[in-house]
Image (cartoon, coloured by chain):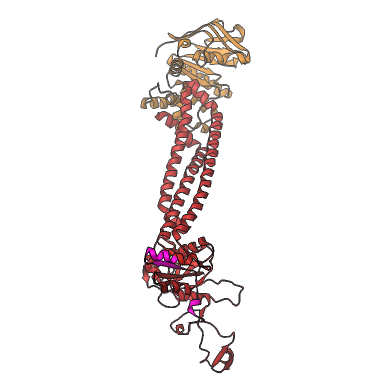
Chain colours: A red, B orange
Amino acid sequence: MTRLLLLTWRYMAFNKIKSAIMVVCLTITLFLPIAVHVMIRHYEDDLMARAESTPLIVGAKGNRYDLVLKSLYFTTENPESITMAEVNAVNDSGRAQTIPLHISFTARQRPIVGTSLDYFEFRGLDVVAGTLPLQLGDVVLGHDVARTLNLGVGDTILTDQTSLYDIGAVYPLKMHITGVLAAAGSPDDHAVFVDIKTAWIVEGIGHGHIDLTKTEDAAIILSRKDGEVVGNAAMVEYTEITAANIASFHFHGGMDDFPVTSVIVLPDSAKSATVLKGRYSISPTEQMLVPLRVIEELMGIVFQVKRFFDANFALICLATALFMSLVVMLSLRIRKREMETMFRIGCSRLTVFRLQVAELCIVLLVSLAIAGVLSGLLHWYAPQLVSVM
Amino acid sequence: MTSHAIEIRDLTFSYEALGFELTIPHLSIPQGKHVAIVGPSGCGKTTLAYLISGIHVPSGGNVDIGEHSVTDMTDEARRNFRISHIGFIFQEFELLEYLRVEENIVLPYLVNASLGLDKAVYERARSLAESVGIGDKLHRYPGELSQGEKQRLAICRALITDPCIIMADEPTGNLDAGNTDAILELIRNQARRRDATFVMITHEHSLLDRFDHVIDLAKNGGRDTV
């Protein structure tokens, strides 16, 4: 047997390219279904864990997937906003604690999550450096954001311009990094967190500028009448919140009307959850969702797609098997003379057949080994890959 | 090593598809003699060599090598007998390009488990390679050798089992005049050293005077006792 293996190994080593192509084809065929399975499994675990830890979400009526994905993973398009009045309504019901989320803007392509300090406690997020956002303009970076952008406490980060060609758009806000979160292995690692009021300033609902009633600069005063001062476009709004100008920041309108993307609702009991869901089931403008149900529904679709992939893999396996057969047939034709020589020397036809089988077995074993190693590595790194994806 | 002679009686063989038929009523080759088989293309020279070696099985008659009847053996016994008693040298060398020179020499041992492969075999392979002048090329591949060196390698492979019959099918057909002479003498010397019977198929009539006997299949259909 060792003599056959030696002959086979020598043949494969001499015909490196042919052997490598066969190994690569088989490895891909073996590894691909495993890779898809592992990734979907991890993706599902990741999605489910986040969904399971979030009991209820309130948001505007519309696409429930968008609402849940935005609220849990900060991805997808911005769903319709609701107002802070909804947050207050749930709070006033005395049946649940609420955590508002406003996720409409980005800073260096990372989502800005405007929320309250309760969010950090709810998600179990701790800072590894600095403090949580305690005042307007403070920002805390998710672990991966700090790592990839090479930013830390004391640095600043600018919000992204929403439209370069809209001269009426709000200027980007320079925010001060006051903390960096510990790695959580969740979407929180890829987001930047601000107080919800800072999020409203980013949106332009709140702003800061010089006090027109006290300024002597006539160039920026349009009119003064009965204690009412109207400034012109020359009045510059602050694009950075500092200790010197923080007092000038203010909001126009009532807070009840300010937008939030969604509200995480933490009911105090199952009964409260049922009552609240009942209330929202008849609401014409808002919806209350159980994230776990929505994600399960979504995964159902993903698994339907996976079934399609599985069928696809079956075809790939068939194609690979045919390809391997072709390679073997061509190889037999090319090696016919060599095999005939062996036979004439005194080798049996069975031995010649065994040589071919041994070659296929070695290719299969090497492919299995590589696919196994790759699967192991994928299994090991899947959580990181899933979080990056 | 036991002395052997080749004895053929009433041998018939045919390729029905080609309409070819070979009949050898009687042919006897004594042990240690050097015999050339000549004849035009298609007259059955190679077929005769294959019948003697047991590669082909005759449809009738007997082929005896020494006290062994090749025709009465099972396929496996015939293969084992061939690999240990007959050394084959081919016109096209028929070397395995993916094996090094040393491994090509011991190929009979690699492809047939009935032969014991040990260090002594490799030592013999090295010694044989030295004796034919390719001792310094043991770790090269056939593709790195000249035509003459390839045939020397093929001779080593044929001799590694210390056969009592050396069967050569136009071994000089692909060589130039200088190499032809050298290779033929090399085989003859090796055969003489082993007291082996040397049967060579050839087209080259200029070489025939080196042989003890010549069988012309075209002239007498192999009805010969040499």
**Quadrant of res A274:** bottom left
Query: Count of labels shown?
Result: 0
Image x and y of residue A232, in percent: 59, 86
Q: Where is residue A365 in the image (x, y as percent from the top left)?
A: 43, 38
User: Along the line of sight, which residue is nearer the eye, B149 or A182?
Assistant: A182
**Quadrant where the N terminus of chain B is found in the figure:** top left
Q: Position of residue A93 (x, y in %)?
A: 41, 72
Q: Which of B54 and B198 is in front in this view?
A: B54
Residue ID at (56%, 29%): A333
Q: Which residue occupies the extreme bottom position in the image?
A: A226
Residue B78 seen by the camera? yes
Left or right relative to A302: residue B220 = right
Q: Residue A64 location, x and y as percent?
A: 51, 61
> Is A273 inside the magenta-drawn segment?
yes
- Quick check: B37 above or below A328? above
Q: Which of A247 and A369 is in front in this view?
A: A247
Tell whether B91 sits left or right of A365.
right
Residue at image position (51%, 19%) is B185
Q: Which range is magenta?
A: A250-276
Q: Image height check: is A300 above or below A264?
A: above
Q: Is residue B2 magenta?
A: no
Q: Is any part of residue B100 visible from this angle?
A: no
